[in-house]
Image (cartoon, rainbow, N blue to C red):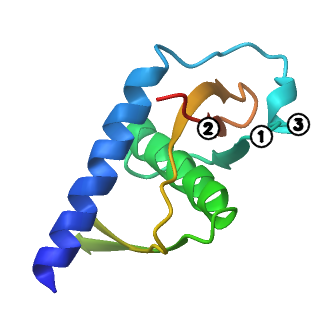
Amino acid sequence: MNCLRAALLALLCCFFLAACNTVSSVNDNSVRPAWIDNPGSGVSASAGMHVRGKAAQEELAILRAREEYAKRFGVKIEAAQTMTTTVAGGRSNTVGAQVSREELRQVDVKAEVKAKWRDPNSDVLWVWLVPSTQ
């Protein structure tokens, strides 16, 4: 079971790294892109500020988009994230854990991050996931 979790975590990490490499930077324009409300054949998803920083915020937005995209093909993704904060002696420590499980029915789902946009007013990060051409 631990081996399966490790394999799924490694798969998710590879996906996130590949997705991060497809877009060079976040578009910080104040104009909301049209693809957020009309993603075409792709999906758009967002994530608010994250306690673990901008990289974790991006991972969460991509995971949400990927889950939504996968639903179209009958792929079921279950994700659980826990955060624990302890305070002792005036210092706090936050530890997080994420577990994901995918249930596939012989479907090959390929997608890539086409664009990212950070709302300058709310610091919400939006990602646009589209079908991959590879």
Residues tagged 3 and 2 counted as in contact (Cβ below 8 A): no
> Circle 3 is placed at which residue position?
38
Q: Farthest residue in the left direction? A: 3
Q: CA distance from mark 1 to mark 3?
A: 9 Å
In space, the residues marked 3 and 2 are separated at their CA atoms by: 15 Å
Q: Position of residue 133 (x, y in %)?
A: 54, 28
Residue occupied by mark 2: 131
* Residue 84 at x, y percent in the picture: 33, 74
Other-residue count near label 2 (Cα within 10 Å), few / some / many at <14 / 14–19 / ≥20: some
Q: Please tell me which residue is depicted at 61% across the width and 51% down the height of the picture.
A: 65
Image quadrant in which the N terminus is located: bottom left
Quarter assignment of residue 41: top right
Q: Observer-nearest residue: 47 or 99?
A: 99
Q: Is residue 11 left or right of residue 44?
A: left
Q: Earlier in the sequence, mark 1 or mark 2?
A: 1
Amino acid on which the number 3 mark rests in the picture? Asn
Foreground: disc 1 or disc 3: 1
Cβ–Cβ under 8 Å for marks 1 and 2: yes
Disc 1: CA contacts within 10 A as few (<14), some (14-19) or many (>=20) = few
Residue 92 seen in the current view:
no
Which amino acid does the dot numbered 1 rest on?
Ser
Q: Give the residue drawn at x 22%, y 74%.
A: 5
- Examine the rendered structure and indicate whether residue 107 appears above or below residue 41: below
SS for callout 3? loop
Q: Is residue 62 left or right of residue 72?
A: left
Residue 35 pos. (x, y %): 81, 30
Please name the amino acid that badge 2 sits on. Pro
